[in-house]
Structure formats: structure tokens, C-alpha cells
Amino acid sequence: MTAVRVLTPITQPLDLASTLDSGQCFRWRPEADGAWTGVLGGDVVRLRAASQGLLIESAPTSPEQMVPRVMKYLRMDDDLPAIQRRLSVDPHMAQGVAAYPGLRLLRQDPWETLAAFILSSTSNIPRIRRTVELIAVSCGQAVTLDGMTRHTFPSPERLAQVGEAELRRLGCGFRAPYLEQAAQAVATGQLPLSGFRGVRYQEAAEALTALRGVGDKVADCVMLFSLDRLEAFPVDRWVQRAMQEWYGAGPLKRYDDARKWAWERFGQDAGYANQYLFWRRRQGQGAALHSQGLPLDPLAGPQSPKSAR
DNA sequence: TAATAACCTCGCAA
DNA sequence: ATTGCGAGGTTAT
């Protein structure tokens, strides 16, 4: 008899909500009781924090077999306390760590990550979620976990056949041809994505940015969230604001300058530092919440920085 | 090299 | 309800 669920002990800090809802992934859904359901490869997976560890349900692969995959996905091999200790010499990082102590980076599928971040250009998280889900429902395979049906993210081969017009219909907009071309590049082996883990940073970056629609920022997201390049430091609007407001780093004009800034300051931990900057700054919305003590109130309603008419 | 517009739609606020 | 603005960027001038 295979158990329908398994409880696996964990020794690392882990907060499912901040990890699965901090903008690095787009397909996890919260349930009323604190569980999160998503799709890993060809399996539906439900995760739930338990006092003794992590509770896993999955299908069609059994939870026992899923354990190592889930651990890899959650990067439980990262020594997060050590990373947090190193970063916390910086007061801003210390605040980030305090606000999101169980926030972990993920080790996602490179192809799905590339596709999702191509779609992120001039977009927003709700829309990215919607489009990625539409693509999965429309082009992926249905998989069910006790009554809940989700869909796998389509392979590059499958997506390469879909066509630009259909991708536009699914809401990709001007990113449709970019996504189609990326799918073709991966499907034909022109872009050997699966071999990119462990190659040098610059080599992977150059290969990724050779794709149309993939610039420095998207390439950094792919490298950080799926290719084990923990030093990658994606500089987007939010991170740039955080750098300016919290560090007085004037608007760094060139992307390379921001990257260098991060590497000098955070070194190998730049990726985790980035996630703290991004998520904490974004939660703060328009407010420039400095000059106060810990702004530890992610539950407070959205403040309106704009003039109150 | 540095600045600026265009790109598709959608989400959200007035 | 309807409208208008800007969005986690990239590319082409």
C-alpha cells in the first residue's frame, strides 16, 4: 500500500507562503488551511507545514518518491541560516531576514522558468500567473490529485508547435513571438538549457540573452531561480528602488554597474539578498518605509502614497 | 554611449 | 460601469 501522504522531517527554515508567493514562481495556489498546491514536472503536489516537518501529497507519483524532488525544488540543500548570518551584517538585510525568515529560493525547471520570465516583461504578477496558467491548461497535460485537476507546463517541443497567433490569443501579447522562438531554440537543442547548471555565469548569460526578448534581467531570473546561479542579481524596478532608497545607490545607469554593486556587497549571496530586497520593497509598495524601525506589517492594508485627492 | 518610443493586454484604481 | 494609466523588460531608433 502506498501512503497518500508523507511527513518528511526538515531542519532548515521554511515558510511556504513567502517562498511560493514571492514572485519567483507563478503556479502555486494557497488553500484555505495553509496548504499550497502546485505542479512539479508531471505531478500535482500539495505541501503543508506540520509541526514535525513538511507534509507532502502528490499524484501520480507517490509522495515517498516525491520527497527528494520536493527537497531539491525547495533548495533544502542551501544552508539558509548561514546565508542569513552572513547577510545580516547589513542592517537592511537583517530586516529582510527578520520579516521573511523562512523565505527560500527555489530550484525550478529551467524551461518553465525561462518561459515565465519572458512573459514577465512589462507585466505584473497577476497577469503572468494568468497567462502561464492559460498556457498550461490549453497546451499541457491534465493531472489530478484527489479531485483537484491541474495541468503540466507544456514542453518546449509542444509549445514550439502552438504558433504565435494562439499564444497571442492566450494573452502573451508582444511576447508571443519571443516565447515561440525560445521554445524552438530549446526544442531543437540550439539552446542546451538542461546542460546549463554548473556552467560559468557569463557563458549561460550570453547564451540566454542571445534569445530575442531575453535581456540581462530575465536571464538573471532564469539563472537564479532555475540554474543554481545563486550569485545572480536580477535588477528590476523594485530592486532598483530598494537600492536607491535604502542604500543611496544613485540610479545606476548600466545594468552591469548594478550587478557589480551587488557582487561587491553581497558576493555569493547576492541572489538571496536580491530576493529580500525585491520582496520586502514590493510589499512596501509605493511607501518609502525607511526612517522607521522594523516595518513588520505585511498585513496592513495597501497604503496610498499618492495625494489623497 | 545615452535617451526615448513602441510593443500587447490586462489589472487596478478612480 | 467605464475609462485611463502603468506594468518585475527588451529592442529598435
Image (cartoon, coloured by chain):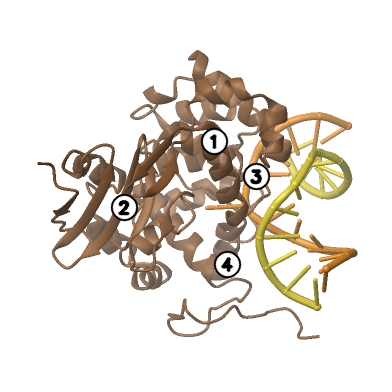
Chain colours: A brown, B yellow, C orange
- Residue A95, quarter of the rendered image: bottom left
Q: Which of marks 4 and 1 is in front?
A: 1
Q: Which amino acid does label 4 sit on?
A: Gly
Q: What residue type is labelled 2?
A: Arg
> Of marks 4 and 2, which one's residue comes earlier in the chain?
2
Query: Could you say whether the residue bearing mark 2 is in a helix, strand or loop?
Result: strand
* Location of the N terminus of chain A (image quadrant): top left
Q: What residue type is labelled 1?
A: Ala
Q: Can residue A217 be seen in this view?
A: no
Which label number is shown at residue A115?
1
Residue located at (61% from left, 76% from top): A287
Q: Nearer the viewer, mark 3 or mark 1?
A: 1
Which label number is shown at residue A121?
3
Q: Is residue A138 visible?
A: yes
Q: Label 4 to label 1, Cα distance in Å?
A: 34 Å
Task: Give a yes or no on whether discs 4 and 1 share a subunit.
Answer: yes
Q: Nearer the viewer, mark 2 or mark 1?
A: 2
Query: Could you say whether the residue bearing mark 4 is in a helix, strand or loop?
Result: loop
Q: Residues within 10 Å of mark 3 (few under 14, many from 20)?
A: some
Judge from the rendering whether residue A306 lies leftward or rightward of residue A249; answer left or right.
right
Residue located at (66% from left, 24% from top): A163
Q: Label 4 to label 2, Cα distance in Å?
A: 42 Å
